[in-house]
Amino acid sequence: MIKENLLKIAATVHAPARLIAVSKTKPVEMLQEAYEAGQRLFGENHALEMRDKHEVLPKDIEWHLIGHLQTNKVKYVAPFVAMIHSVDSLHLLETIEKEAAKNNRVIDCLLQFHIATEETKFGLDKEEACALLDSEEYRAMKHVRICGVMGMATNTYDYDLVRREFANLRDIFNKLKERYFADNENFREISMGMSHDYKIALEEGATLVRVGSLIFGARNYSNL
């Protein structure tokens, strides 16, 4: 079933967009099945769960931390994480910089923006993002690389609203690109869209879509 699901979804995700299989709460056996079907990008919400899975699964997996990240958990993923999607403060970015330096590597990061109507979601607004990018602390960093933006749309069946929110994130990306990253080829990612709305996200310019339940089935909350 996982292989069939992956092939079906992959047929709708065309380059330069890439599919991240969101594997939070799923057992390693299911991830291994997806791996054997050709999937290499996996997304996890929790740092410790991702660390544990990384230890036992193939080492050519590209791990994406897509959930809210506490600063005291950065150290667990800094040695191997491919990209952190959820940078929502200068303080978190400073911690990633410190832990990346300890591991002698550069960690790719996305700035997370609050684009939804729900107040419970995390993320920066445009003014906060500009303050971060203009700060002396950010300019001095050598071990983080800002590669784009991430956002989560409102959890709703109002797909016109979802489309407007994705378009807003694309507009934020374009403005940041023009102001801060015009000559930076690394700044190219727009991470948006999940199982129920990823096709809209692709239409609005997503380069990374985060699909879980359509691949692995419904989340098992008892494993949280």
Image (spheres, rainbow, N blue to C red):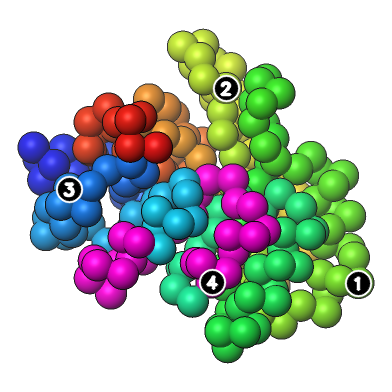
Instruction: Check disc 2: other Cα within 10 Å, few if <14, some if 14-19, many if 20+.
Output: some
Instruction: Check disc 4: other Cα within 10 Å, few if <14, some if 14-19, many if 20+.
Output: many
Q: Is residue 151 above or below residue 182?
A: above
Q: Secondary structure at mark 1?
A: helix
Q: Is residue 95 above or below residue 157?
A: below
* Closer mark to the observer between disc 3 and disc 1: 3
Q: State the residue position of label 2.
A: 154
Contact? badges 2 and 4 (CB < 8 Å): no
* Closer mark to the observer between disc 2 and disc 4: 4
Q: State the residue position of label 4.
A: 78
Residue type at numbered disc 2: Thr
User: What residue is shown at x 67% (from left), y 20% (from top)?
Assistant: 117
Contact? badges 2 and 1 (CB < 8 Å): no
Q: Is residue 224 above or below residue 43?
A: above
The answer to which of 168 and 51 lies nearer the viewer is 51
The answer to which of 153 and 69 lies nearer the viewer is 69
